[in-house]
Amino acid sequence: MTEQIPARNGFGTNGHLTDEYLAVLADPRLAHTESAADQTDDQTLDQIHPPLPAAQREHLGLCGPCHAAFEATERAMEALRDPAALHEPPAGLWDRIAAEIAATPEHASDRGASMASVTELRPRTSDRNSRRQSQREPSRRSRAWIPLAAAAAGALLGGAAVAAVLGQGDAAEVELPVAVPTVVGDATLEPVAAEDFTGRAEMVETEAGALELTVEISAAPDPEAGYFEVWLRDEDGTQLISLGSATAGSTTFTVPAGIDLSQYPVVDVSHEHFDGDPGHSGITLGAGPMEEADI
Amino acid sequence: MRFAAGEPAAMHDLYRQHGSFVFSLCMAALRHRQDAEDATQQVFTRAWRSRDTYDITHPTGAWLTGITRRVIADVFARREKDLQAAEAGADAAARDGAPQPTDAVVDRVVVQQSLNQLGPPQSEIIRLAYTEDLPLKIIAERLEMPLGTVKSHVHRGLARMRQSLEVHSD
């Protein structure tokens, strides 16, 4: 969606709507055509602006990043209507700040005391990835998959750790006498393109150290001339790994060994057509971020 | 980040870079000069105290926006408390008016800052198109530019502002 390359039909080479097209959607006056819209007042614009082509309308409805970008464009236009004044802070303000900073003790006790309030301020590693959902799902931020995989605790789940366990199977068996699959994470698949979609996904680590993802599709529209495909992807949908096709009900996939799950934190179920195109159709029926299991 | 390593001079750099933005945000939200100065001071001292939690993968501006939101929320909470204590609700409410949601205030300040960074002629075109709400054709005539050029300035400018909003909405 940040492509600057002129694109056909509003789509960039990355498969997202272009900046130009997003702007046209938010403000039809920007359409390239030298149409009557340029000479007409705003009231009649809706009638003059041609209806949005179906492919782009569908993409906007289904693609989280593009929809978020569209909403942010509208917010920018709204914010411009009521411009805020920019002020230079008064000359003496930095001196007051510097004095307060200089007076801040560097003792360990003070650091400890300040941490209580400070921790709340921490920009979490997951923010960048979850921000588009954060307003709708604030509670998810603290349990998102990313910080776990990135943090030391995440070594348990990271691809490197999985490889290590696989590589030294004997030692691992000795270390882990309880050889049962361990649930390492789960995801609730929220409906995206289909309102009647419900599903969940659960990631387990088998006794052999492999990761398996079980996806349960409890309700889904009839795939008609197509099928469901399960993906691990990043928040923006720019990096995807296909795990394979799924049926309504429960399907279990082996997650490729060595995958860095922090790069693919979202489980996505798409509606694919029998068109021979191995890529994601762009129609996400449901998706959700993988979250750390409560162990 | 040098300030994360504990260099006060680096904090000064951060202030030079973002002081105007933070102060403008406090002014727009609090609508009271002294409160805005105090709040700005608090933002930077809090940032200093919590510098070891700064995540270097994030822009410092967005990090400061997060701290500023909290400081503003604290001021609103304190005002509310003062109001109740003083039971002088009518006067104070008349003075402050109903505060705009902080999200909208952040958007307004972020967009203006982004507009300033765009520079002419893009900033002027965007202002005419959305703040003045002029038809694009009039803008093209006024600036003696082809209509298509005006349109492409607008969509590029909107993209920049949208990206700034996304950064600061964390």
Image (cartoon, rainbow, N blue to C red):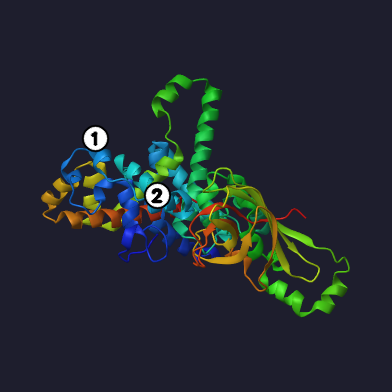
Question: Which residue is tagged 1?
Answer: A43
Mark 1, chain letter? A
In-image side of B128 versus B97 (left or right) = left
Residue A229 image point, x, y percent? 59, 60
Residue A111, visible in the rendered structure = yes
Q: Amino acid at mark 2?
A: Arg
Residue A26 image point, x, y percent? 33, 47
Question: Which label was assigned to residue A201?
Answer: none
Q: Up-down: is B166 above or below A171?
A: above
Question: Which residue is tagged 2?
Answer: A57
Residue A107 image point, x, y percent? 65, 58
At x 20% / y 54%, what residue is drawn?
A: B150
Residue A1 image point, x, y percent? 40, 59
In-image side of A94 versus A80 (left or right) = right
Callout 1: SS: helix
Name the quadrant of the C terminus of chain A. bottom right
Q: Which of the 4 image quadrants contains residue A293?
A: bottom right
Q: Relative to the observer, which residue lies in front, B112 or A6?
A: A6
The mark that comes first in sequence, 1 or 2, is 1
How many marks can you see? 2
Q: Relative to the observer, which residue lies in front, A232 or B26?
A: A232
